[in-house]
Amino acid sequence: MCFMKEEVLVECSQIDKFYGKKQALKKVDLKLFTNRITFLMGENGAGKSTLCKILALLSSKSNGKLFYKNTEIKGELRAEYKKILGYLSHQTFIYSHLSAWENLVFFANLYGIKNKKEKIEQLMDSFGIIENKNQIAGTFSRGLQQRLSLARTLLNDPNVLLLDEPFAGLDPCALNNLAKILLDQKNSERTILIVTHEIDDTIEIADNFIILKAGEKVFEGSFYSKENLKEVYFEYFGGEKQ
Amino acid sequence: MNFIKVVILVFMKDIKDELRRKENILSSLFFALLSLVLFHFSVDMTSIDLSKEGAGLMWLIIIFAGTIFIQNIFRKEEENGVFLALLLAPVDRAAIYLAKFLVCFVFLAILEVFLFVLSFFFFGAAVFDSPLQLTVVALAVNIGFSALGTLISSLLMNQKGSSILYPLLLYPLLFPLFAAAATLTQLSIKSSLAFSDPWLRLIILFDMIFLGTSSMLFESVVED
């Protein structure tokens, strides 16, 4: 049996976030490990996306600290951390008037990627969009756009993948494909955080779960089945199991 | 990545994007053309006299037609949330601002050439009597207009009612710039514009303040 090495890559400690007087996050602690997929769950407005954006340095925190490999992320480390970061959401982050190829070349240039042509061709090939490379991205189907978006996210070989509702709006086939891709990514020494509020078959790829309620972390651990997760989830949110 | 390279990269991407989507460029140019024709008939001028009220009218068209283009310079980045992808990149965010500023600057220059050439051919405006002085005035105004317009466009990104708020925030701040522009245009047509003119100094001061502070403020404007 083969055990993969797990180490804490990203950590946040005592994170608070205020929007005016409203507190969106309350003293949240979180550790993300290599070779693990962590699901961040909670009802709407629980602070999941806010936390994800803070981890992606897209939003500032009001209090608390962020660490990458046990070093606080500030100053020059911010730029270094951004280089190893991949962020994906239900929005595709692609320019709809540029072709798939032009989109990827633009972002590859922004990240200063060497051998970008080979890298882009390899990613497009592995995601099955090489034949659409000259097609304008705005004309892609939702599934194809999500694949292009994922290719963009993986351009810089990120060690940390932060995915905010990546399964939203995908048909079952595209959803299954994305889940497979994420499992492959996990096995390539990546740290993956997935924000979701849905309890569906995709939870089978998770190694760890964190549940937020009104900005507070109320649960961290793993489950042996979907039913088991539902029981705990609805205990916190007062809904009924289906 | 090198600051200048990022500016060029984002600038080129934006130019390509604008040329393909066409809507901002065409609606702005069409508005300018329509305004020119309407002013011509309503004022019943046989020719546009840029040394008098014509200068004010010309800048009025530029401010409104320019606004149509500039207010969308960041709004188009809301599409597919792509602005977040720009912010995620390990690049200096001021470079993104500067690239957008340059796109607006170039567009305003094209708009002015379009307007001046049309007014010369159709209404006999004396725009080619002192082209150098007029160019200096136009370029100086473009810097201030683009700097402020781009910053406010980024401020109002993802805001509800941004198309109403945009002119409300922009026009009062632009007032000194365009008052100076109209006066300087009149002077440049009469070939009596001195480069030590207080109105020109006002425009240069305006440009320096807004281009400098906007590049510095941009990082905090887009933070949340």
Image (spheres, rainbow, N blue to C red):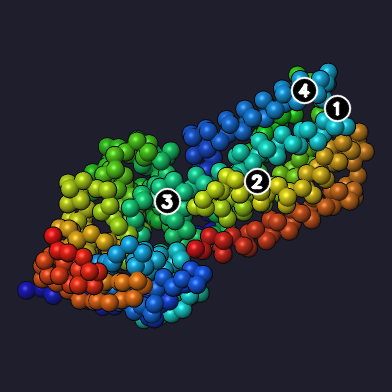
Tag 1 residue = B49
Front position among marks 1 and 4: 4
Which three-letter amino acid code belongs to the residue tagged 4?
Ser
Point 63% across, 63% down: residue:
B216
User: Mark 2 or mark 1: which comes first in sequence?
Assistant: 1
- Is label 3 in contact with label 2 (beta carbons under 8 Å)? no
Give how far across and how far down residue B180 sits, in percent. Answer: 83, 45
Give how far across and how far down residue B18 sits, in percent. Answer: 52, 38
Q: From the viewer's perspective, is A241 left or right of A130? A: left
Pick the residue in front: A67 or A62.
Answer: A62
Residue A37 seen: no
Give how far across and how far down residue B78 sits, in percent. Answer: 47, 49
Q: From the viewer's perspective, is B161 left or right of B136? A: left
Q: CA distance from mark 3 to mark 2?
A: 24 Å
- Is label 3 in contact with label 4 (beta carbons under 8 Å)? no
As displayed, is residue B174 above or below residue A183? Answer: above
The chain holding disc 3 is B
Tag 2 residue = B167
Tag 3 residue = B81
Tag 4 residue = B42
Q: From the viewer's perspective, is B57 left or right of A128? A: right
- Is label 2 in contact with label 1 (beta carbons under 8 Å)? no
